[in-house]
Image (cartoon, rainbow, N blue to C red):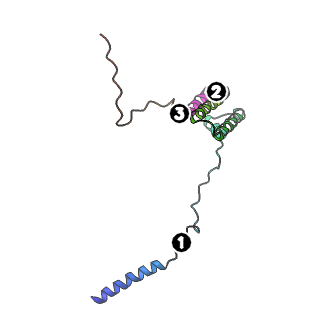
Amino acid sequence: MKNLFAIASSILLAAAVSAQDKPATDKADTKPAPRPNRPTTIDRSAALANFLKLSDEQKTKIKPILDEEVSQQQALRQDKALTPESRMAKVKEIRESTSAKVKPILNDEQWQKWEKMRNPRVNRPATPAAPGAPAPAPAPAPAK
């Protein structure tokens, strides 16, 4: 019995010692997992052209409008003097201006897609109240 205990102890001790002998891997030596091939910048005009199924003529007319919108929004982000409320108002103004410039270029079907894309909340059906929220007041009964 003593021999069995001695053998089991020596096996456990050997396993513990060999586990400690392994050199610790330095995190600086390990390479990060490769990232999937993604474009570093999103070509909004190409994505929009694909989504709206724009003709080549429409693409050439819309691209400068979108580029102008991007540059205006970048300038807005860099302006640290604006309050959040005024920044949001300016963003809304820029978006409305862009939509006004784009509308005459698009056909009716494309314009509807544009509107749904730009204003997704407006086109979404009403959602039920959150759990635990008070129920809406019932409508008054009609007068007799």
The amino acid sitting under disc 2 is Asn
Question: Mark 1 to mark 2: distance in Å?
Answer: 61 Å
Please determine whether, in this image, residue 17 is positioned above or below residue 98. below
User: In x, y percent, where is residue 136?
Assistant: 36, 27
- Residue tagged by mark 3? 120
- Mark 3 burial class by Cα count in 10 Å: few <14, some 14-19, many 20+: few
Q: Position of residue 111 (x, y in %)?
A: 61, 28
Report the disc number at residue 107: 2
Residue extending farthest left: 1
Q: Earlier in the sequence, mark 3 or mark 2?
A: 2
SS category of the residue bearing label 3: loop
For label 2, count other residues whose C-alpha is less than 10 Å away and answer few (under 14), some (14-19) or many (20+): few
102 or 68, which lies in front? 68
Give yes or no for residue 109 being in the magenta stretch.
yes
Marks 3/1: CA–CA distance: 49 Å
Q: Is residue 12 left or right of residue 112?
A: left
Any magenta on residue 68? no
Whether residues under marks 1 and 2 lie with C-beta atoms below 8 angstroms apart, the answer is no
Do residues under tags 3 and 1 come within 8 Å of each other at their CB atoms? no
Q: Earlier in the sequence, mark 1 or mark 2?
A: 1
Residue at horizontal 63 percent and vertical 35 percent from the top:
53
Q: Position of residue 16 (x, y in %)?
A: 42, 79
Under mark 3, the amino acid is: Pro
Q: Which residue is mark 1?
A: 25
Vertical comparison of 50 with 136: above or below: below
Q: Which residues are magenta?
A: 100-118
Q: Amino acid at mark 1?
A: Thr
Which one is in front, 11 or 81? Answer: 81
